[in-house]
Image: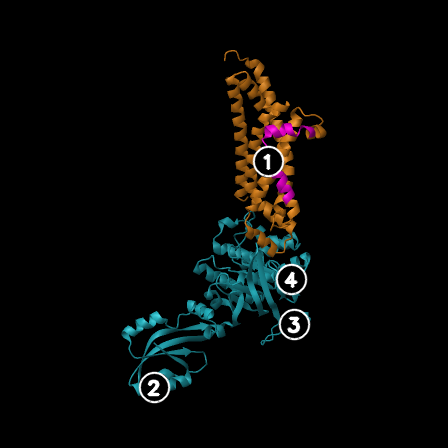
Amino acid sequence: MGTTNWELLWPKIWTALLQTLQMVTIAMVLASIFGVLLGLVLYSTRPGHILANKFVFALLNGVINVIRPIPFIIFIVAIGPLTRAVIGTTIGTNAAIFALTIVASLSIARIVENNLVAVDPGAIEAGRAMGARPLRILFTIVVPEGLGALILGLTYMMVALIDATAVAGLVGGGGLGDLAMVYGYQRFDSTVMLVIIVFLIILVQLAQYGGNALSRKILRRG
Amino acid sequence: MASKSNVLDQPVQPLNDAAGRDEMIRFENVSKIFDSRGERVQALKDVNLSVARGDIFGVVGYSGAGKSTLLRTINGLEIPSTGKVLVDGADIGALNGKQLSAARQNIGMIFQQFNLLLSRNIFQNIAYPLRLAGVSKAETKKRVYELLDFVGLGDKAKAYPEQLSGGQKQRVGIARALANRPAVLICDEATSALDPQTTGEVLDLLKKVNREYGITILLITHEMDVIRKICNKVAVMEGGTVVEHGGVYEVFSDPQAPVTSRFVSSVLDHRPGTEAIEHIRKTHRGQLVQIEVKDEGSSDPFLSRIARKRNVDFNIVYGGVNELQSRVFGSLTVELLGSGPDIELALDDLAQVAEIRKAG
């Protein structure tokens, strides 16, 4: 343990932390946009819902069900050709962000759908009875009523993303997870690994705390 | 069936009832079949009803009688499988999305579970239908506070639904339903989730809505007490059909269908059942006779008059008299004591002035 050269390590940890934050933040922002949109479509087109459409629902539902069970470590490699076509390379932080965004979008779509389905059907019926049209109901009743739970779902996704970035090292994406693997797993330097784990725990705690606080604020209704 | 289609082909004429008021809601041969996974359930069978402008019309029935489905055809939340529903002259089933949306703003609705938007405060809940109708911000504010005053919640504008009691939530529901000054208010078991005291307050408020704004109210309930307290017309439903309908006084004082009798006796327990008769028999061994009391404007003290004339004594053993729609009605069960022939003569006399039935 005495051999650990901390002067050399701190800059590496710092760089890795920034890479993790970069990957998580960018993937989260992009995935939130795509995921929420997909989730809204998924919710609305469900049988019996406000814009029920068997074809659209089955297609989207199918894609999500096929991709979500694939372990991320395999998925990130498997979509290499697509990553090359879009990003121009299959290695590096951007390549990792691309794969993270796809997986997170589909997960968020499912989270959005699940949370919106739980919105009281009575509130939706009240909207219909007042003469609100389907899209109006979606954006002024379903989404606001489900928002508190939705934020908790997105927080869960953010934590899962921090977790998933550990695999990014595989495509040279870097990040804290990668560093922990290199030092802890490959060099048996458990001190470095522990330090990095503490950083990861702090990151997860911060994300969870922020999400909880925001959700509580919304659920307390004002 | 051929004659039915002829009727439907004719242009719809607004009808007038006996009081000369025009018709607000009409159900014409309304049937509804739900088809879920190959199982066909007929929720409504050929319902025909007419609700006049200004009525407080109650539909009563046990759960599964079809009353909720019937109510939902009024604002198109359910569309009849056959037949049609006319509201203020408009055939609800024939409207396109935009027209239906506009028609719904003319039909307020309140719910058993209130169905307020939990993410909005009371002001925003009541303002919601006004925003839908494109009312200006200033006008909305004025109208919302007007409505809050009307329902007695002037100080609750900033509160959230979770902070209100059930009765207060329903008041908000009523304010929201009235926001766009509808012609009709439909109430889906609006007091079933409330305690008796709060139920009374909400019913009083509905009466005020009807009286002050002239809004026609159609409500459904499984509580006959609700009908007794505020309705002027009633329809009794069973198995998807209307088994009996008419003025509340007429239906209560002379129920025809067995289900109607059951409902009436749930609130007006004037006539003794078999158990009560058995119990009475333990102490009263004379001739029991049930006398129906009707509001006929007569001041004839017939009971004591006949008793004196025929030399019999009478003993009131069961009964009750109520006021309904400002008229009284009820039933008294009386024990007659005397000699056999005297009692027979007294019964003959009674039968001439009142509706009687030997009991026990």
Q: Which of the two residues, B178 or B317, is positioned nearer the viewer here? A: B317
Assess whether residue B120 is covered by the magenta stretch: no
Residue A68: assigned label: 1
- Crowding at dot 2, Cα within 10 Å, few <14 / some 14-19 / many 20+, comes out as some
Assess whether residue A70 is covered by the magenta stretch: yes
User: What chain does badge 2 belong to?
Assistant: B
Question: Marks 4 and 3: same chain?
Answer: yes
Above or below B341: residue B12: above
- Colour chain B appears in: cyan
Q: CA distance from mark 3 to mark 2?
A: 56 Å
- Crowding at dot 1, Cα within 10 Å, few <14 / some 14-19 / many 20+, comes out as some
Q: Secondary structure at mark 2?
A: helix
Q: Which of the two residues, B54 or A174, is positioned nearer the viewer here? A: A174
- Crowding at dot 4, Cα within 10 Å, few <14 / some 14-19 / many 20+, comes out as many
Q: Quadrant of residue B9?
A: bottom right
Residue at horizontal 64 percent and vertical 29 percent from the top: A78
Q: Secondary structure at mark 1?
A: loop
- Colour chain A appears in: orange
User: What chain does badge 4 belong to?
Assistant: B
Question: Marks 1 and 4: same chain?
Answer: no
- First in sequence: mark 3 or mark 2? 3
Q: Position of residue B171 (x, y in %)?
A: 52, 57
Residue B93: assigned label: 4
Kindly identify the amino acid type of the residue bearing the numbered disc 2: Glu
Q: Quadrant of residue B73?
A: bottom right
Residue B2: assigned label: 3
Q: Is residue A84 visible?
A: yes
Mark 4 or mark 3, whichever is nearer to me = 3
Kindly identify the amino acid type of the residue bearing the numbered disc 4: Gly
Residue at horizontal 60 percent and vertical 39 percent from the top: A65
Residue located beneath label 2 in the image:
B344
Q: Position of residue A158 (x, y in %)?
A: 57, 33
